[in-house]
Amino acid sequence: MSEFETDNLEDVIESDDDRDLVDTDTEVFDDEPVVESAADRPGEWYVVRCFSGHEKKVSDALMTLIENQGLQNEIYEIVIPEEDVIEIRREKRVTVKKKTLPGYMLVRCEPSIENFQTITSIPSAIGFVGPQQSNPIPLERDEIDNLIRPTIEGLEQPVRKKKTPRHEFEVGNEVEIKTGPFATFKGFVAEINDDQMKLKVLVDIFGRETPVELEFNQVTKS
């Protein structure tokens, strides 16, 4: 064997050893679940206030307008936040969908005056949440994840079981909102719904009292 061949053989052995070392020391995690957050999708998320009970009507009308005007690359997605809740009906467990933010819907779009005007042009769409209607403030990542729960590949989202309500709220109490797009806002309890474990709170938005429906665990007494 020539000196050239001997040198090449040593290089090959050394290369193989290095490769084995890398393969041994590098850990590959193929089974890690993939977590998808709505915050990672293109565009920004905004909260749009609608007349209560008209959320689906506004969503459908906006979807039709987007399709007719070819705005699919400008206004991407409309979400009416809901969750699955287990209720007992006639001694049977039934899973039903409940709106988590009645009177509001979420819209993901490119931030532009034209898109904002298109969204608010829909009948029964009152406007964006926040002081600047022409240039609304998008939701933060934690707010988005709170309203649209991240999906985990291979795992089912848990269903919330309806619980017996326990609270210390009374009509007229001042409360502070802890989570969601109205976090840190304060208001006064106008109605209490024990069956749905929700409060109707009057919050000062745009300089006037606006009713916001919230779950018991979303507020705390001031």
Image (tube, grey):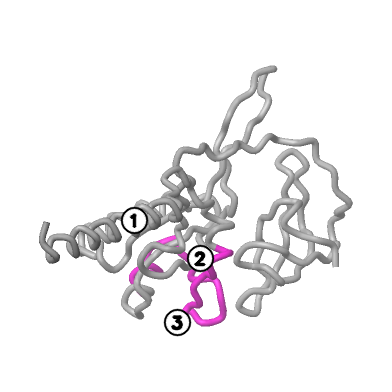
Mark number displayed over residue 136 = none
Seen from the viewer's position, the closer of residues 132 and 52 is: 132
Specify the amino acid type for callout 1. Asp
SS of the residue under disc 1: helix
SS of the residue under disc 3: loop
Specify the amino acid type for callout 2. Val
**x%, y% of residue 13?**
27, 56
Residue 83 vertical position relative to residue 19 in the rendered view, above or below: above
Residue 193 vertical position relative to residue 159 in the rendered view, above or below: below
Specify the amino acid type for callout 3. Asn
Q: Residues within 10 Å of mark 3 (few under 14, many from 20)?
A: few
Q: Residues within 10 Å of mark 1 (few under 14, many from 20)?
A: few
- The residue at 52%/64% (across/down) is 49
Comes first in the chain, label 3 or label 2:
2
**x%, y% of residue 115?**
33, 73
Res 8 quadrant in image: bottom left
Assign the C terminus to one quadrant of the image: bottom right
Comes first in the chain, label 1 or label 3:
1
- The residue at 45%/48% (across/down) is 29
Q: What residue did someone put label 3 on?
A: 135
Look at the image and give the residue range highlighted in magenta: 117-143
Comes first in the chain, label 2 or label 1:
1
Is 122 magenta? The answer is yes
Q: Does the image show residue 62?
A: no
Seen from the viewer's position, the closer of residues 48 and 208 is: 48
Q: What residue did someone put label 2 on?
A: 47
Seen from the viewer's position, the closer of residues 75 and 124 is: 75
Cα distance in 3D space between marks 2 and 1: 58 Å
Assign the N terminus to one quadrant of the image: bottom left
